[in-house]
Image: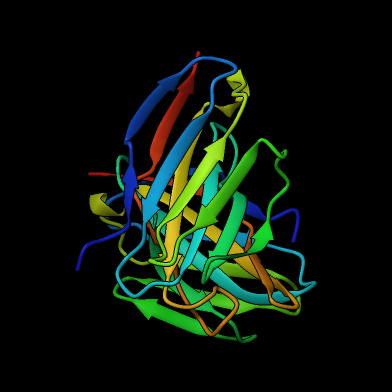
């Protein structure tokens, strides 16, 4: 069974550009959540999607957006990139929404974004 | 849930030592407590998900306990091995209506040497 797949693995952008990151969950998983990891910070929650609906959103500016498709694949978009957006972006999937039972998350390898 | 604290921040032990870490969290809107292990250059991997006060989970040499009333969880590693070297993350799951959110601590970085 294939794991959570994130593309691209590495990305270099310049300030002001926009970027789209992709996440394909494990087959049969309907929940996808996104996290940002920067040095010295814990994993910061960005959003959570379940069955194409955003169920929760973290404290990030509106430049960060996401969506989920009918096949559960998810994309995350960051517009007008800033230097501080440089980070590792991880997505995680689970069969059901995290609040249902004791679902654990399965993480992808992440996309390392560098903004110059 | 704000202010998830993990201690110590880092730990260096010898092979064979037993060790433990602490995760403390506010108990408001608490639903579950997750523990993950994150090895360098790999993805975080789930260790345990616990929900009940007094819950204890075990996986090989690693075990965890949960106290939801006072808001803390302990992770124990018995007889540490070099392959246990990783960052251990805890994350309480809060549930407000249908909106759930995992709030990760900054982790405890464990280094096990021969």
Instruction: Pinpoint residue A19: horizontal percent, then vertical percent.
Output: 49, 31
Q: How many marks?
A: 0
| Residue B2 makes an appearance in the image | yes
Instruction: Pinpoint residue B68: horizontal percent, then vertical percent.
Output: 70, 78
Q: Residue furthest right?
A: B28
Q: Residue furthest front?
A: A70
Residue positioned 35% across, 52% down in the render = A108
Residue nearer the viewer, A60 or B74? A60
Residue positioned 29% across, 74% down in the render = B60
Q: Quadrant of residue B65?
A: bottom right
Residue positioned 59% across, 24% down in the render = A81
Instruction: Pinpoint residue B92: horizontal percent, then vertical percent.
Output: 63, 66
Residue nearer the viewer, A87 or A20? A20
Residue positioned 51% across, 45% down in the render = A76
Rendered position, B33 above or below A106: below
| Residue B12 makes an appearance in the image | no
Colour scheme shown: rainbow
Q: Quadrant of residue B79?
A: bottom left
Q: Is residue A44 left or right of residue A58?
A: left
- The N terminus of chain A lies in quadrant: bottom left
Q: Is residue A18 left or right of residue A58?
A: left
Instruction: Pinpoint residue A55: horizontal percent, then vertical percent.
Output: 65, 66
Residue nearer the viewer, A91 or B26? A91
Residue nearer the viewer, A47 or B113? A47
Rendered position, A62 above or below B75: above
């Amino acid at each position: 069974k294939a794991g959570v797949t994130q593309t691209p693995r590495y990305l270099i952008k310049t300030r002001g550009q926009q970027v789209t990151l992709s996440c394909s969950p494990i087959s049969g998983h309907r929940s996808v959540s996104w996290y940002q990891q920067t040095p010295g910070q814990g994993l910061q929650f960005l959003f959570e999607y379940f069955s194409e609906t955003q169920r929760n959103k973290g404290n990030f500016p509106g430049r960060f957006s996401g969506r989920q498709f009918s096949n559960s694949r998810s994309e995350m978009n960051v517009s007008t990139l800033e230097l501080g957006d440089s980070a590792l972006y991880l997505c995680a999937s689970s069969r059901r929404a995290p609040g249902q039972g004791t679902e654990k998350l399965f993480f992808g390898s992440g996309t390392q974004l560098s903004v110059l | 849930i704000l202010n998830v604290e993990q201690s110590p921040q880092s730990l260096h032990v010898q092979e064979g030592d037993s060790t433990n870490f602490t995760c403390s969290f506010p108990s408001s809107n608490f639903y579950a407590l997750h523990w993950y292990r994150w090895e360098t250059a790999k993805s975080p991997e789930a260790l345990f998900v616990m929900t009940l006060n007094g819950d204890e989970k075990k996986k090989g040499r690693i075990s965890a306990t949960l106290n939801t009333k006072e808001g803390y969880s302990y992770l124990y590693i018995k007889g540490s091995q070099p392959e246990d070297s990783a960052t251990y993350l805890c994350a309480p799951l809060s549930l407000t209506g249908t909106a759930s959110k995992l709030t990760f601590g900054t982790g405890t970085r464990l280094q096990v040497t021969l």
